[in-house]
Amino acid sequence: MRIYEDPYLLQQQALAWRQAGEEIGLVPTMGALHAGHESLVTRARRENARVVVSIFVNPLQFGPDEDFARYPRPFDQDAGRLTALQVDALFHPSVDQLFPRSFKSAVDPGPLGDRLEGQARPGHFRGVLTAVLKLFELAQPKRAYFGQKDIQQLLLVRQLGRDFALPVHVVACPTVREPDGLALSSRNVYLTAEQRQHAPVIFAALRAAEAAFRTGERDAERLEQLARDRMAAAPGLAVEYVACFDEIGLQRPARAAAGNILATAVKLGSTRLIDNVVLGAGSD
Amino acid sequence: MRIYEDPYLLQQQALAWRQAGEEIGLVPTMGALHAGHESLVTRARRENARVVVSIFVNPLQFGPDEDFARYPRPFDQDAGRLTALQVDALFHPSVDQLFPRSFKSAVDPGPLGDRLEGQARPGHFRGVLTAVLKLFELAQPKRAYFGQKDIQQLLLVRQLGRDFALPVHVVACPTVREPDGLALSSRNVYLTAEQRQHAPVIFAALRAAEAAFRTGERDAERLEQLARDRMAAAPGLAVEYVACFDEIGLQRPARAAAGNILATAVKLGSTRLIDNVVLGAGSD
């Protein structure tokens, strides 16, 4: 595995691979890799001649009061994992290399970027898409791998690809969970032992609502309320939103249908966690 | 020459050319082609294995009170010219094909998009760059050709390419002029005979200021004033701005230097015309 810090050198390598007819799979990450990331890399490895993983804690997608500074950065450990997974190139630019002071442009995700996560985190998806577009241009992927856990990010990256006809297939990969159901997240390390003990209620609540959907409940608001009620009992947990929405317009459906998303964001102490399930997909 | 209306089909062809190692030159236009466009196409033809010209009157870059509806669209005549110039592909999508109702994203040019032309035409460069990025993704050019006449557009497309590391070389081509100096523009057809008679004063004024620069004047404001004064005498001509600025930050320099731009926008009756010269480049 070769490590690239210079964006230009990565792009030269990617263009050479592409010119040679070697398809490239890209896994964009912020590092602090866990089994969820590993599942993306494993799939990319299976489907592409070349695999590029980026590790970049993207300042553009953090709000001023968020955890940019303390976000975990265990680079050597991450690099070791990626070597073991037979990644071809690890792209690890500095902030100045990817977004120098002269950087002025941005990708505006439009109104869907202001809903849900975007409402809680103004400018978040603008920052995400601006970085994603640049990573796509640098790594020239045929396929890019994103986790289903960050569902709105996945859907907005899909929108970006569709709107601009980016020649990249956006591949969604299932959320990887702890045995007790908690979705893997680099932010789980922030949880105290007690918070960690209560955290599985998030997925349990979504799963309960999804079970209600499968046994006939089609009222989206009632599905949301069901998940909210289930989480209300957990001490120290504050629900930010529970939202049922369709995959394209991110709007609450008149009648919930298979394929709709039920997503939530909660705070456990000062740690913000998100999770979601797809209605009708089962969740066991 | 093959005409493509379907963006997907153009992209498939472009990707196939690229895969075969054939470099693509793109000339984005709004049609109503004149000798200025022809000079871009001729250069693209010389430098690339494949040439794609797009004709698309981009609604995103027109303000609500501007000339989108009446902008000239002599398609058959344009197609004839491009056939004669041995263009490989003419891309001529409808508005719905390039920007369907589901289209939500945009490229935000940042603060430089609000200056000069952007101040007079709010949202103009956002619309330009949104279309340009999509055309780049569809046509997969190695080189893209833009006229120096639309200088701020050229500089913002360059900024877009730099910011996102687009693997496209943005080639600037000199402004083509009538024998009396008027810059060729598809909007010149809007001029009455009398307006047309006064229009050469625009370039004459810029050229006079540029001559003053070459003989030692380095005060940017005085260079601007010189051009403004020269145009003041022309009946029916209203100067919107004359601005001296550097190529990167679009800021007025403390001391004018070779390579700085002197640009103007004027109205002749209801027709808005722009022009510019590069200081130190000579202008004869």
Image: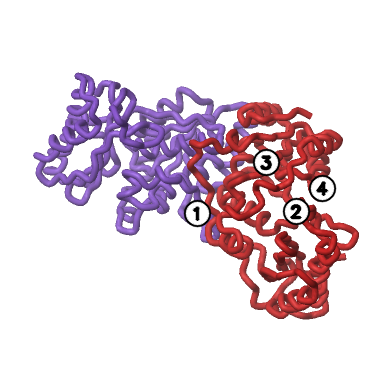
Chain colours: A purple, B red
Horizontal side of B246 relative to A269 (left or right) equals: right
Q: Residue at x 27, y 32 (%)?
A: A262
**Real-space Cα distance between discs 2 and 4?**
11 Å
Question: Label 3's element?
Answer: loop
- The chain identifier of the residue carrying mark 4 reads B
- The chain identifier of the residue carrying mark 1 reads A
Instruction: Please name the residue that numbered disc 4 is placed on.
Output: B34
Residue A27: name its quadrant. top left
The first of marks 2 and 3 along the sequence is: 3
Instruction: Please name the residue that numbered disc 1 is placed on.
Output: A99
- The chain identifier of the residue carrying mark 3 reads B
The first of marks 4 and 3 along the sequence is: 4
The first of marks 2 and 4 along the sequence is: 4
* Nearer to me, B249 or B276: B276
Which three-letter amino acid code belongs to the residue tagged 1? Phe
Percent of width and height locating residue A61: 39, 50
Question: Label 4's element?
Answer: loop
Evaluate whether label 2 is on the same chain as label 1: no
Horizontal side of A23 relative to A283 (left or right) equals: right
Q: Are marks 2 and 3 in contact (CB under 8 Å)?
A: no
**Real-space Cα distance between discs 4 and 3?**
15 Å
Which three-letter amino acid code belongs to the residue tagged 2? Arg
Instruction: Please name the residue that numbered disc 3 is placed on.
Output: B56
Mark toward the viewer: 1 or 4 = 4
